[in-house]
């Protein structure tokens, strides 16, 4: 389980960000929110309406810059996995069946149970 939370977009750690806003298994920092707002403002001003476009996270990064960020990418994957585990745990707390959880995850009941079942420690 990841101990440090980080922005899912720029990988900034929570101690490096002023604010870190949580989503389902992900986080976004205040700098990325501002950048997104700026990108949206630019897109809405200069692009025709109704066209969706993606801004890829690696953009202009060199191989070395991408490799430097790889450990944080791994931490983000762990963070997302922790978020998924928390959602499944909450669904189980609400007595939702493994059958329905598995169906929601596109896997069998048994696969869902094997991957997400945790002993409840009290
Ligand atoms: Zn960020």
Image (cartoon, rainbow, N blue to C red):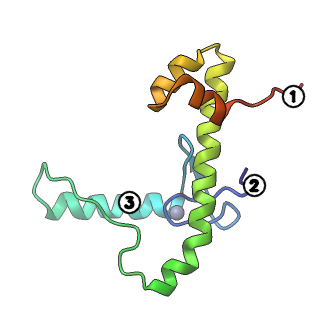
Q: Which residue is the site of mark 1?
A: 121
Please say if 34 is above or below 121.
below
Please say if 82 is above or below 55.
above
Say which residue appears at 31% left-offset and 64% top-offset.
55
Query: Left or right of 50: which side holds 5?
Result: right
SS for callout 3: helix
Residue 11 position in % (x across, y down): 57, 65
Residue 3's disc number: 2
Tell me the crowding category of disc 2: few under 14, some 14 to 19, or many 20 or more residues within 10 angstroms, Cα based. few
Closest to the observer, 44 or 11: 11
The answer to whether the residue labelled 2 contacts the one labelled 3, judged by CB atoms less than 8 Å apart, is: no
SS for callout 1: loop
Say which residue appears at 65% left-offset and 44% top-offset.
82
User: Real-space Cα distance between discs 2 and 3?
Assistant: 26 Å
Is residue 26 visible to the viewer in this orientation of the structure?
Answer: yes
Please say if 86 is above or below 54.
above
Q: Which residue is the site of mark 3?
A: 36
Please say if 63 is above or below 39.
below
């Amino acid at each position: 389980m990841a101990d440090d939370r980080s922005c899912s977009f720029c990988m900034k750690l929570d101690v490096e960000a002023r604010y870190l806003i949580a989503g389902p298994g992900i986080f976004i920092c205040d700098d990325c929110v501002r950048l997104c707002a700026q990108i949206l403002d630019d897109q809405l001003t200069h692009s025709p309406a109704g066209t969706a476009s993606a801004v890829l996270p690696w953009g202009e990064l060199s191989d070395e810059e991408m490799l430097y960020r790889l450990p944080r990418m791994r931490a983000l994957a762990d963070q997302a996995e922790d978020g998924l585990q928390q959602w499944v745990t909450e669904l189980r707390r609400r007595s939702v069946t493994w059958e329905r959880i598995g169906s929601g995850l596109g896997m069998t009941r048994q696969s869902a149970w094997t991957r997400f079942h945790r002993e409840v420690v009290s």
